[in-house]
Amino acid sequence: MEGGNHTLIIEFVFQGFSSFREHQLTLFVVFLALYILTLAGNVVIVTIIRTDRHLHTPMYFFLSMLSSSETVYTLVILPRMLSSLVGMNQSISRAGCATQMFFFVTFGITNCFLLTAMGYDRYVAICNPLRYSVIMNKRECVQLVGGACSIGLIVAMTQVTSVFRLPFCATKVAHFFCDIRPVMKLSCIDTSVNEILTVIISVLVLVVPMGLVFISYVLIISTILRIPSAQGRKKAFATCASHLTVVIVHYGCASIAYLKPKSENTRDQDQLISVTYTVITPLLNPVVYSLRNKEVKDALLRATGRKLP
């Protein structure tokens, strides 16, 4: 089909992990296991938070939203990646590619801002404990989650519209899903304006939330250090450790992927970074929160205790 001087591309083909061809079955088994663990872990976290009244607090409300968002985020990318690893259909329609990119960007950015909301929650809990229940009321929590989702949707619409307005001349996406840069590389024209837009958006959705979380933790740590008892300091640090671990990995990987100059990495390095934030980070969330968090552990024990004869 011709469109002006350009062929109208109606589908793309993922090159996936073609450079690891002899290891594709191993990768499939590893990613499938990680995917099952991620889904199971996030579903358990959401279920436990919904059913255990001890966890009906702002911190766990945000955690259940993050787990729900991570679950959809992995559903958008991983099933198709797994099917291409075992040699099934590696093509995707233009509309399918745009849809995948839209959901990937929406939920990826929503996660960034949910982590920021969780940082704010920890800040209020530790630095302003007497007014915590007044400040972090139900309405405030819902508004923070709504704000995170709205930013994700607005940015996704902007990015997807700007990328799919481009004329495409090639069909082979050097990736395992429709990420922004690999799809832009298929364009027939210069994509400098799109590159600048992507960098500006990346700075706004990564550096700004990271900065806010950093400021929260500077204030949190200075408050914790003023707590007179060692036990009190330990407890306060413990409530923040899980969140801080997830934040460092999440923002770290996303920053490496989206804030680096475009020619810095090879395709294989890019894919390994992408695997980290599409496979490892969503798994990290339930693992860190269930292993490091006494309240979640206690809730799990109560839940399993109820089921025991």
Image (tube, rainbow, N blue to C red):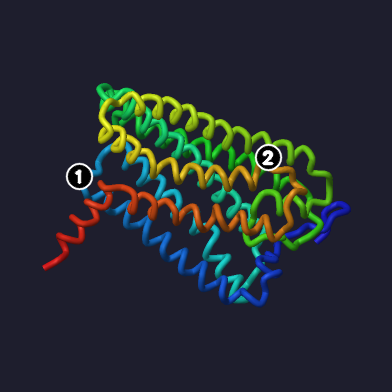
With respect to residue 239, does 75 lie above or below?
below
Looking at the image, which is closer to me, 146 or 17?
Answer: 17
**Which of the two residues, 238 or 299, is positioned nearer the viewer here?**
238
Query: What residue is disc 1 on?
Result: 53
Q: Secondary structure at mark 2?
A: helix
Local crowd size for mark 1, using a 10 Å CA cut-off: few (<14), some (14–19), many (≥20):
few
- Which quadrant is home to the C terminus? bottom left
> In which image quadrant can residue 238 be found?
top left
Going from the N terminus, do you reach mark 2 or mark 1 first?
A: 1
Q: Residue at x 52, y 46 (%)?
A: 250
Q: Residues within 10 Å of mark 2 (few under 14, many from 20)?
A: many
Determine the secondary structure under disc 1.
Answer: helix
Residue 53 in the image: state x and y as whole percent: 20, 44
Q: Disc 2 marks which residue?
A: 198
What's the residue at 61%, 70% (across, down)?
A: 84
- The residue that appears at 67% across and 60% down in the rendered structure is 175
- 14 or 244: which is nearer to us? 244
> Could you tell me the amino acid type at mark 2?
Thr
Q: Residue furthest left?
A: 309
Question: At which x and y percent is residue 247?
Answer: 48, 42
